[in-house]
Image: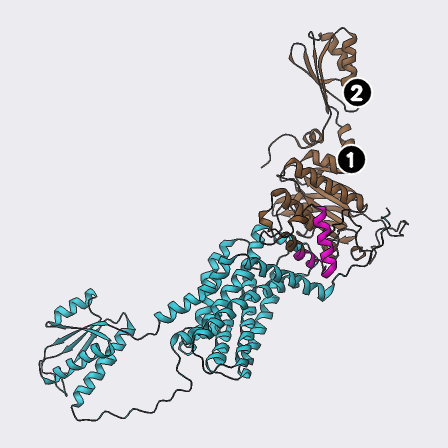
Amino acid sequence: MSVVSSFDPPPPFLDDDFPRPLEFPEIPTARTRPLRPSIEAIGLTKRFGDFVADDSVTFTVPPGETYGLLGPNGAGKTTLVRMLTTLLPPTSGVARIRGHDVVSARGQVRRAIGTVSQAITTDENLSVRENLSVQGKMYGLWGRELKRRIELRLGQVGLWEKRGQLTRTLSGGMRRRLEIARGVLHSPRVLFLDEPTTGLDPQSRRAIWDLLGEMKASDPELAVVLTTHAMDEADYLCDRVAIMDAGRILQEGEPERLKRALETGEHVSIETDHPISDTHRDELAAIGAANWRSPAPGHVEFQSRPGEGVGRRASQWLEEKGYTIVHLTIAPVTLEDVFFSWTGRGLRE
Amino acid sequence: MSRPAVAWKPARVARGPFLAALGMLAICQRAYVTLWRQPVLLISTMLFPIIYLLLLGNSLNRPLRAVSLAVVDEAGNALSAECLRGAAALETGRDLVRLHIVQDRAEALTALRRGAYRGIWVLPQGLARLGPTPSFIGDNTDRASYETLETALGEIWTEAAAGRGVAPAVPSSRLEAYPYLDYVTYLAPAVVCLAIFMGSMVSGGLQVLEDRMYGYHEGYLVTPITTGALVSGHILAGSIIASIAGSAVLVAVLLFAPLPLLSSPSIAASVFTIFLTALSVSGVWSLLFSRARHASVLRGMFGIINAALFFPSGALYPIESYPAWLRTLSALDPLTYGVRALRDLILKGAPIASCYPAWLFLATFTVVCGMLTRVLFRREI
């Protein structure tokens, strides 16, 4: 049996254009469809008694964008996703998915979204195919259409050969891939991924990243919201990220822009044949080296602004001054540096 | 943003009532497959009521045998000898008693208090037809044996006191409207209802709770299926499994119990009654678990709900013997109607029309439970 290998565009039945919301002006496109945000959250707040899980969160995700929600445990990411996926009513604020309010138009919202939860939601007593069959029916899929989609999605996540196997016998990575197949079975327009690769080995993580990349490539309008603790994952997958803590979005933007905005993001380590004098050190500081420390004679470490080549220029300058560079490391700034700079290093409760 | 120019055939996607029906089908499919994949649960669901039937049916309402009885013959005359012969006949004939001839009344009384005897029959000195007459001292903590012994010994005295050559009174006419049924067969409809109770618990009730505990429910709460369809699906799934369990027990009863009045229409009507009873009991479980999140709720509730549904139903003893408050509970208990309709159909061969009121109650009860569950069900995490 052949398995279709590429992702297909979403079917018209999920194209929830009607009724058109008045608040979004129609922008002519190739299909003369109104371009409206896939997700729009305005002042979204969730309180549990005195505890504020999400505090007036505002953000917008246009179609086709992968938006990352980063934050330590208890930052409010999962609560935010639950509000957007109709699983929790907001205490205040407004959220719309493709123009449909998550409170008053839950039916349309549920039709438009797909979710891959942090929890394992596939039934371990069912086979791989039965899990998708049950889920598909809940989206109104049946008959040949359902069969075709199960075949397609299982092929995409590499589980077609395991279709008759009981879910409880799958490895963690396979189970997670099945969760993703289940989340996208009905070709959602907005996909929510809540820590989709937690606890997986590097191969499984990479397979899931590739899968998401393939999905994005085949459906340019698919908006994805990804919550994760893995900064490399967010860096690799997300067009924009929001750093959350204590229920608030502290910073939002493209990963590269956030990294470049970090004053002391780049870490430079230089080992020389003899100790750098204090005079030369002051001159290096003038180039842009900050937070200077010397762990050993002939070994200096400093930080600098990313993208300005301070490390490279400093090493050239030292060589011009007669030092021999024994070892040079320029560690680029990572999203983790950005994350720590906004959330701090303190442990959360 | 433009899409790839791929011609899409409109997908055949269910909407409205068809979507609800598909969603319910999915829930039932899952419950059915899940249960078949857990044979231990399946077997215990069906085995529990049958064990219940065998143990309860054989431990209740059986004739008493070999009850210890002390006889103190203080009279030593012809009449007391007649009484002793009668008592000996109780031992050798009906095997009701084990006789112990004791000389001293005080000694017998002490032994009774120690639990050696269940009763003492004292034939006092000078025993005569006009008095003194025999006295019976019995262990009245056990009403069943006390009353049986008292009646049997009373009959012996009446016969002995009447004297030889006096013809016994002609018994009044006694007719039985239905063929003879032993207690185990009488219990069969109740046990079918017990199987329904178990089946609906392990599939409908337990499934909802397990889904919440293990997080499975997150997968279907975000789908477009309506909450009403979700609730109906769970009730239906529970009732299908419960109907299978109830019908399996019914088949076991039909195979082993002599039921001469049974006919094909009454078997069909019995299966329908089982389905309606299963729906209503599943409704009760769904209502109870509409907000529950932990298995401790089930563990805590199982005994209470079992007792609250089974005992007031008239399954073991006639409802007419209940106090007023228990009769009210019985009138609201769906198992009462299930047991009654099944008894009418399979024990009495009653016309199907006689079950209509019970069917109407069961259907209404299910709808009310479903609506309340729909209101209480929180589609939230």
Q: Is residue A41 above or below residue A231?
A: below
Q: Is residue A65 above or below residue B64?
A: above
Question: Which chain is cyan in the picture?
Answer: B
Where's residue A288, x and y in %?
Answer: 77, 18
Where's residue B155, x and y in %?
Answer: 22, 84
Q: In screen coordinates, is B51 left or right of A147?
A: left
Label 2 crowd (10 A; few <14 / some 14-19 / many >=20): some
Chain containing mark 1 = A
Q: Is residue B162 above or below residue A209?
A: below
Q: Nearer the viewer, residue A36 or B16?
A: B16
- The circle on residue A254 is 1
The residue positioned 23% from the left and 71% from the top of the image is B139
Q: Is residue A154 visible?
A: yes
Q: Secondary structure at mark 2?
A: loop
- What residue would you read off at disc 2? A309
Where's residue A295, x and y in %?
Answer: 64, 14
Q: Nearer the viewer, residue B182 or A235?
A: B182
Please identify the quarter of the rendering in which residue A199 is found. Answer: top right
* Image: magenta residue range: A133-157
Please identify the quarter of the rendering in which residue B179 is found. Answer: bottom left
